Amino acid sequence: MKKTIMGAMVALTMLSGQALAAGDVAAGQAKAGVCAACHGADGIAVIPGYPNLKGQNEQYIASSIKAYKAGQRTGGLAAVMQAQANLLSDEDIANLAAYYASLK
């Protein structure tokens, strides 16, 4: 019985790790061209008041983009981000988050 429980715990741990796997930095960099118009080629915003993405927490970036995509973030220029986020797949979002988080 203990072996069965341990085996199940190991399997669940492995599956949860895959679900939380980081995005692909290179793919994120390739996709970041549109983002650079406002957030800068190096992740430092070129427009005052726009957030810097360079070195930001990967999970924070991903959850923020997903919130725009879901229409949960409103106000200000949220409509611009909502439109951009709607063009991204979950994989694109993970990749972009990994890319910007990797910038130091």
Image (spheres, rainbow, N blue to C red):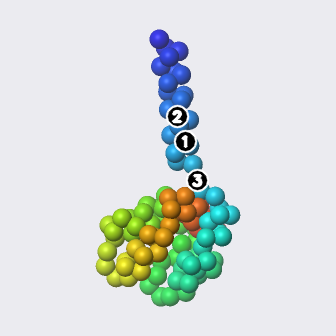
The amino acid type, in three-letter code, at marker 1 is Gly
Q: In this view, does 39 lie to the left or right of 27?
A: left
- Above or below, 61 relative to 52: above
Q: Mark 1 points at which residue?
A: 17
Q: Quadrant of residue 26?
A: bottom right
Q: Relative to 5, is 98 on the left or the right?
A: right
Could you tell which of marks 2 and 3 lies nearer the N-terminus? Answer: 2
Identity of the residue drawn at 55% across and 41% down:
17
Which of the labelled discs sits on residue 64, or is there none? Answer: none
Q: What element carries label 1?
A: helix
Q: Name the residue under label 3.
A: 22
Element at badge 2?
A: helix
Local crowd at mark 2 within 10 Å, few (<14), some, or many (≥20)?
few
Q: Name the residue tied to disc 2.
A: 13
| Quarter where residue 65 is shown | bottom left
Gap between marks 3 and 1 measured at Cα: 9 Å
